[in-house]
Image: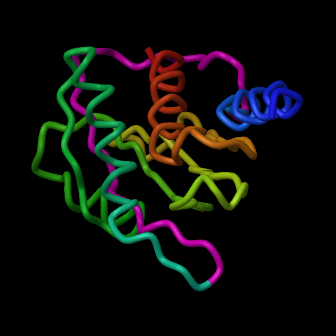
Amino acid sequence: MKRWFPFLALLIVTACASSETLEMYPSSRIKHPLSTSKNIGIQVPMDGRFDDLVYDGTGEKAANVFKRELEKRKIRSELLKCASDEDCLSAIADRPIEFLILLELLHWEERRTAISGLVDRVTLKVTVMDRTSGHKMHSAYLQGVGTRSLGGKSAETMMSELVQAYIQKLY
């Protein structure tokens, strides 16, 4: 038994270790930062999916992550349930919203068990649009990939970290 102890200890330590890859494309600073005094509309995207599996509620979670991060910076925001850019622009025609954040969940793969050794993945396309001109000011892909370990971060946690970093670039 004493000979197996170092091996078991190493196995437990490596199984619980976690290092995620969080990437944003493009990674450069935004040329025209947004004003913190302007209201923001956030599109609620369709739920994420992987193959034929739909992860219910993930679109709402992604939009709420943006809303929480904006609220931390005292920026007023509103969730919008609209299917396209044009629908969102129509929905805010009579509201005091200056910018739209359009979201599209391109990939959502959340493993419900750490034992499988498979990684969580999330990819979100973000587009910032000026309401008055309809001009798309910035677009980025936020991508998070977990590790093959026990105790790695969930797709939702990775999404939160990505959004936090992205919002810092917007302001």
Q: Nearer the viewer, residue 98 or 41?
A: 41
Q: Residue at x 57, y 50 (%)?
A: 124
Residue 125 position within the rendered picture, expressed as x and y whole percent measured from the top left: 58, 50
Tell me which residue sits at (44%, 34%) in the image. 160
For residue 44, what is the image quadrant?
Answer: bottom left
Tally of numbered tags: 0
The color scheme shown is rainbow
Task: Name the residue at 22% across, 24% down.
Answer: 71
**In the rendered image, the vertical position of residue 103 relative to residue 84, given as above or below:** above
Where residue 91 sits in the image (x, y, percent)?
Answer: 20, 60
Q: Using the image, determine if residue 40 lies above or below residue 115.
A: above
> Residue extending furthest right?
3
Where residue 133 sits: x, y (%)? 41, 41
- The answer to which quarter of the image holds residue 162 is top right
Task: Please tell me whether the stretch drawn in magenta is mainly helix, strand or loop.
Answer: loop
- Relative height, residue 143 to residue 116 (above, below): above
The magenta segment is: 23-51
Between residues 46 and 35, which one lies in front from this camera angle? 46
Q: In what quadrant of the picture does the N terminus appear? A: top right
Residue 74 pos. (x, y %): 19, 16
Residue 39 is inside the magenta segment: yes
Instruction: Compare residues 119 and 48 and report the one nearer the observer.
Output: 119
Q: Is residue 40 magenta?
A: yes
Q: On the image, which quarter does residue 51 sit in?
A: bottom right
Considering every residue shown, the one lying at the far front of the view is: 1
For the point 43% across and 14% down, the residue is: 171
